[in-house]
Image (cartoon, rainbow, N blue to C red):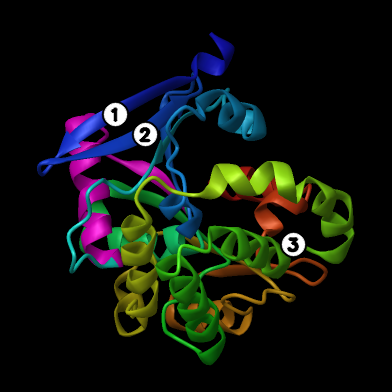
Amino acid sequence: MFYNAVNSQLNISNAKMDYIRFGTGKKNLIFIPGLGDGLRTVKGTALPFAFMYRAFAKDYTVWVFSRKSPLEPDCTTRTMAADISKAMDLLHIEKAHIIGVSQGGMIAQWLSIDYPQKVDKLVLAVTLSRQNGTVQQVVNSWIDMAQAGDFRTLTIDNFEKSYTDRYLKKYRPFYPLIVPFMKPADPGRFILQARSCLTHHSHDDLHRITRPVLIICAEQDRIVTAQRSYDMAGQICGSELISFPEYGHAVYEEAGSFNKLIIDFLG
């Protein structure tokens, strides 16, 4: 099978958690995706994900976990980290490198703080540890759109705020094809995840992270802003920060050197 790619599902606390796995390496690498998981889980995406991140497939067994469904009404990024910890136990993953992107980075922070014995090295990409006006405005507007059932506008706004103009010029003509697939079966799940972004605050606990940390930010980020990455770097002793001046929030898709930077860091 292509890169040993597998789609699967776990039972966790009376809920289901979609996950995928690929790669043949002996070392474990866990990728925690962002808020887009609230629109569509990783179910059925093992092959395209394995192709996109094939550079990791030789040295690592890569796991990508969605948030469980249903989520508790009072769920937080911290309880989502606890769910990842439970998934690791069920799959007998004692320790792993962790990559968290956007909201996934918020969850990864708590995983590293509350379960340090399970984390080897940590990568935090385009994320934050405390709130600012930008993320509050953006995410609240998405919640309003989701509550109104307007996932067309929500999806387009997400694209427009995430990608560079040169990328958008190529892909705007495809909006009519992409947007219909982004309406979630359970809009409430997206709203719960979005609200957890707005309550995330791990900043005062970041000093408890003692594992090697790579922080990646994008200077044109119009969702969480690059400044919040600099804030995190100041709180995590010995952390390394790399900034992409020409990219926005979707730097992990647009920047050709993104994966190589992480591979070099993980060693």
Q: Residues within 10 Å of mark 1 (few under 14, many from 20)?
A: some
Q: Position of residue 12 (x, y in %)?
A: 16, 40
Q: Main secondary structure of the magenta part?
A: helix
Instruction: Using the image, determine if residue 218 lies above or below residue 35.
Output: below
- Read off the residue under disc 2: 19
Mark closest to the chain's N terminus, 3 or 1: 1
Count of marks overlaid on the render: 3
Q: Position of residue 139 (x, y in %)?
A: 49, 75
The numbered dot on residue 119 is: none
Question: Do callouts 3 and 1 mark residues in contact (Cβ within 8 Å)?
Answer: no
Query: What residue is shown at x 51% (from left), y 30% (from top)?
Result: 45
Q: Is residue 89 rendered magenta in the image? A: yes
Left or right: 111, with 103 as reference point:
left
Question: Do callouts 2 and 1 mark residues in contact (Cβ within 8 Å)?
Answer: yes
Question: Do callouts 2 and 3 mark residues in contact (Cβ within 8 Å)?
Answer: no
Q: CA distance from mark 3 to mark 1?
A: 31 Å
Q: Position of residue 203 (x, y in %)?
A: 37, 82
The residue segment tinted magenta is 77-99
Q: Quadrant of residue 251?
A: bottom right
Any part of residue 113 in sight: no
Residue type for callout 3: Tyr
Instruction: Using the image, determine if residue 76 lies above or below residue 225.
Output: above
- Could you say whether the residue bearing mark 1 is in a helix, strand or loop? strand
Q: Residues within 10 Å of mark 3 (few under 14, many from 20)?
A: many
The numbered dot on residue 163 is: 3
Q: CA distance from mark 2 to mark 1?
A: 6 Å
Q: Is residue 158 rendered magenta in the image? A: no
Q: Position of residue 44 (x, y in %)?
A: 47, 27
Query: What residue is shown at x 43% (from left), y 82% (from top)?
Result: 235
Most distant residue in the bottom direction: 133
Any part of residue 111 in sight: yes
Residue type for callout 1: Gln
